[in-house]
Image: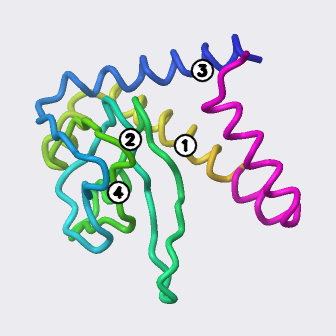
């Protein structure tokens, strides 16, 4: 299990590594600092280089829904790509000091159009992300409260735990 997890992680890092060849800038964030807010005009596609960033959504009731914890190699803000008037649909806030690589959407789009292999890499990364999200939603909706809790704890242990 651990070997398969490491192999998958290496494959994702290999796919993400190609995006650092695209001109961009490094953004440093402090603990609790927002990278972007829901509704902001979307200008950048981000790759987490270090640290952790929570992707959240605020409910009308004021409650905060934590959708995912992005760490090294994670893509953030990719959803508005190719939209006419793009806006971010979530919030991104640093859980700890973090460093992200920011690529402006027009620059990214230009590279994706020139380099089909890069576009395929992006599709693979986004597909893997969607599979993870679908698994989470399935577990939360189909297994009841107790099953959803167990599933979440197992997923956290598999993703962030260390074998001792």
Q: Is residue 84 left or right of residue 151?
A: left
Q: Which one is earlier in the sequence, the residue at label 2 or at label 1?
A: 2
The local secondary structure at tag 2 comes to strand
Foreground: disc 2 or disc 4: 4
**Could you tell me how far apart the alpha carbons at marks 3 and 4 are, in whole angstroms?**
25 Å
Residue topped by disc 4:
92
Foreground: disc 3 or disc 4: 4
Q: Answer few, some or many: residues within 10 Å of disc 3's Cα (few below 14, many 20 plus, some between 14 and 19).
A: few
In the drawing, what numbered circle is on residue 8?
3
**Could you tell me how far apart the alpha carbons at marks 2 and 1 are, in whole angstroms?**
9 Å
Along the line of sight, the residue nearer the viewer: 119 or 96: 96
Report if residue 155 lies within the magenta region: yes
Along the line of sight, the residue nearer the viewer: 111 or 65: 65
Does residue 135 sit above or below 25 in this rendering? Answer: below
In the drawing, what numbered circle is on residue 75?
2
Q: Which one is earlier in the sequence, the residue at label 2 or at label 3?
A: 3
Q: Is residue 80 left or right of residue 68?
A: left
Tell whether label 3 touches label 2 (CB within 8 Å). Answer: no
The local secondary structure at tag 3 comes to helix
Tell whether label 1 touches label 2 (CB within 8 Å). Answer: yes
Q: Which one is earlier in the sequence, the residue at label 3 or at label 4?
A: 3
Tell whether label 4 touches label 3 (CB within 8 Å). Answer: no
Residue topped by disc 1:
129
Q: Position of residue 12 (x, y in %)?
A: 49, 24
The segment highlighted magenta reads: 136-164
């Amino acid at each position: 299990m651990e070997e398969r997890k490491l192999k998958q992680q290496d494959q994702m890092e290999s796919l993400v590594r190609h995006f650092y060849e695209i001109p961009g800038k490094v953004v440093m964030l402090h603990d609790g600092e927002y990278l972007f807010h829901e509704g902001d005009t979307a200008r950048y596609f981000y790759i987490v280089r270090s640290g952790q960033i929570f992707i959240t959504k605020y409910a009308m009731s004021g409650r905060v829904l934590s959708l995912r914890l992005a760490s090294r190699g994670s893509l953030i803000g990719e959803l508005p790509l190719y939209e006419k008037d793009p806006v971010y649909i979530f919030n991104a806030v640093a859980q700890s000091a973090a460093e992200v690589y920011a690529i402006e959407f027009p620059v990214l789009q230009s590279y994706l159009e020139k380099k089909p292999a890069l576009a395929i890499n992006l599709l693979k990364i986004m597909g893997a992300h969607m599979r993870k999200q679908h698994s989470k939603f399935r577990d939360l909706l189909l297994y009841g409260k107790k099953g959803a809790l167990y599933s979440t704890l197992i997923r956290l242990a598999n993703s962030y735990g260390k074998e001792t």
